[in-house]
Image (spheres, rainbow, N blue to C red):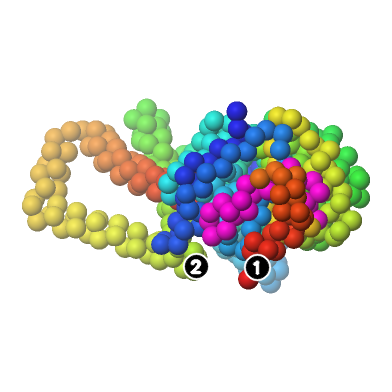
């Protein structure tokens, strides 16, 4: 069964359609790149799946369920902006995740923090923006979730950490789980992707395995993206 | 899950309140000692500091009640809080209960601080208690009314906090100027409630409804008529709580729109 299934999903802000009747199905075990220019509807789609927005019409199902408490327990969501409680220490955030998510793997999170040289006893307020993003990504990836929704996960971190993060995503591979990554930085992530979904003006412009795209068009995802979305 | 939510809520607010409470209690103790020693100038200064701390505590209670809801549910932290596998009801109730507890504890600490400051000037408790002949305060009827009054006051506190929550949630109806819209919602709701109260009183007097109700209540004993008034008051506040809660819940579950 598809881990994510969207059927005629639409979201309007006033008269403006952010999503316009999207049909999308993501199978388990896939790493999917959700790619599109600014304001194409990527974040809106992710927010609906994370249970942060109610669709205007249509349905989104995660593991057969509409977004709610049950789906939030199996969806690991990384928003574009920082959501960390600034008054806490890194260790407090670990305890927080352990308290609320039964699928949180504390040892895994601690190992990743150690590998990236982040001290658990540091207060979040004292961390740089990039380090905060790393902490947030570690928290999200240390969950053993069914669906990972990563909205611009590598935008604010340096290239070295970017590689580490992408490796973490690949290493985290679980045949039961899928990862949806929304980003503009296609060149950096295309090596890890199984499928790509191009989204344009709230509609799906392309949904294909990466290998098929390379074979059929004879170019990389990055190059093809530039061609499709040429201004 | 409710207890876990409350734990973090207590931590978030406690880290600000506990030092403030500690400072107030220490300063009031110092004031008390200066007072005992009849040191006029130091007493005056420490009384001034205590008053500033007391005002500060009440301002912080108000600001934190708003800030914990706004920042944690409607602003950036909302991206985490609103994706936790917990119900909207639990999120609202945890915030409401913890904010209420800190409101009540603040009042207790302030009363305690005032007693510490002026304690030496008061007659001992045994003397105070002698002032009551004991006949009224020990009856179970009086205890019942006191309990009712406490329930009424707690519900008033709940309705005040839930009104703030409802107004902040209504701010999500727009994408810009949310604090301004929330403040506007507060003005509109409180004005509407005042108008409804004024109309009820006017109609009650004009139609003679109040008078016949008073006559009806007079037919009962003092205790029963007091009971009738208390239950009506509790019912009205409960209704307000339910309305503000429903607005907040609906906005958070159906119209959530984080920025």
- Residue B1, position as x, y percentages in the image: 60, 33
The reply to whether the magenta stretch includes residue A204 is yes
- Residue B259, position as x, y percentages in the image: 57, 59
What residue is drawn where x is 58% and y is 54%? A205
What residue is drawn where x is 70% and y is 63%? A226
Residue position for label 1: A230
| Span colored in magenta | A188-207
Residue position for label 2: B176
Count the numbered circles shown: 2
The reply to whether the magenta stretch includes residue A147 is no
Q: Is residue B167 left or right of residue A114?
A: left
SS class, disc 2: loop
Compared with residue A14, is residue B237 higher up or lower down, i.e. above or below?
above
What residue is drawn where x is 28% and y is 35%? B227
Compared with residue A93, is residue B172 higher up or lower down, i.e. above or below?
below
Chain designation of label 1:
A
Q: Residue furthest left?
A: B207
Answer yes or no: do the residues labelled 1 and 2 have beta carbons within 8 Å?
A: no
Q: Nearer the viewer, mark 1 or mark 2?
A: 1
- Residue B235, position as x, y percentages in the image: 31, 40
Q: Quadrant of residue B29?
A: bottom right
- Residue B193, position as x, y percentages in the image: 30, 57
Q: Is residue B144 left or right of residue B169?
A: left
Q: Quadrant of residue A50?
A: top right
């Amino acid at each position: 069964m598809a881990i994510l299934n969207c059927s005629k999903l639409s979201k309007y802000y006033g008269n403006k359609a952010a999503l316009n009747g999207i049909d999308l199905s993501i199978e388990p075990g896939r790493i999917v790149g959700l790619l599109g220019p600014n304001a194409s509807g990527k974040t809106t789609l992710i927010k609906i799946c994370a249970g942060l927005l109610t669709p205007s019409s249509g349905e989104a199902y995660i593991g057969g369920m509409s977004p709610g408490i049950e789906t939030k327990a199996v969806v690991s969501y990384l928003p574009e902006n920082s959501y960390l409680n600034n008054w806490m220490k890194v260790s407090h955030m670990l305890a927080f995740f352990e308290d609320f998510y039964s699928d949180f793997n504390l040892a895994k999170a601690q190992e990743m923090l150690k590998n990236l040289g982040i001290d658990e006893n540091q207060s979040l307020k004292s961390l740089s923006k990039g380090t905060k993003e790393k902490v947030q990504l570690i928290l999200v990836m240390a969950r053993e979730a069914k669906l990972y929704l990563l909205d611009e996960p590598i935008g604010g971190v340096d290239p070295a950490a970017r590689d580490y993060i992408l490796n973490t995503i690949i290493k985290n591979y679980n045949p039961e789980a899928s990862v949806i990554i929304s980003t503009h930085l296609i060149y950096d992530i295309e090596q890890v992707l199984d499928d790509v979904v191009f989204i344009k003006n709230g509609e799906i412009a392309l949904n294909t395995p990466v290998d098929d795209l390379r074979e059929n068009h004879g170019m990389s995802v990055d190059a093809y993206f530039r061609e499709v979305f040429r201004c | 899950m409710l207890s876990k939510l409350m734990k973090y809520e207590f931590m978030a607010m406690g880290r600000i309140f506990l030092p403030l409470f500690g400072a107030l209690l220490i300063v009031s103790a110092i004031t008390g000692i200066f007072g005992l020693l009849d040191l006029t100038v130091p007493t005056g200064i420490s009384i001034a500091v205590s008053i500033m701390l007391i005002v500060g505590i009440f301002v912080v209670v108000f600001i934190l009640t708003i800030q914990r809801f706004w920042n944690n549910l409607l602003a950036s932290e909302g991206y985490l809080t609103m994706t936790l596998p917990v119900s909207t009801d639990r999120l609202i109730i945890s915030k409401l209960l913890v904010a209420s507890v800190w409101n009540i504890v603040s009042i207790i600490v302030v009363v305690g601080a005032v007693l510490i400051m002026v304690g030496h000037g008061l007659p001992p408790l045994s003397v105070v208690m002698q002032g009551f002949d004991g006949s009224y305060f020990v009856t179970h009827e009086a205890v019942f009314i006191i309990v009712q009054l406490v329930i009424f006051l707690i519900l008033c506190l709940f309705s005040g906090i839930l009104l703030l929550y409802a107004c902040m949630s209504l701010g999500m109806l727009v994408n810009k100027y949310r604090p301004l819209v929330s403040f506007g919602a507060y003005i509109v709701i409180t004005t509407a409630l005042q108008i409804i109260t004024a109309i009820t009183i006017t109609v009650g007097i004009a139609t003679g409804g109040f008078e016949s109700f008073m006559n009806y209540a007079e037919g009962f004993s003092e205790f029963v008529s007091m009971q009738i008034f208390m239950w009506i008051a509790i019912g009205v506040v409960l209704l307000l709580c339910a309305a503000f809660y429903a607005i907040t819940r609906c906005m958070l579950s159906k119209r959530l729109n984080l920025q």
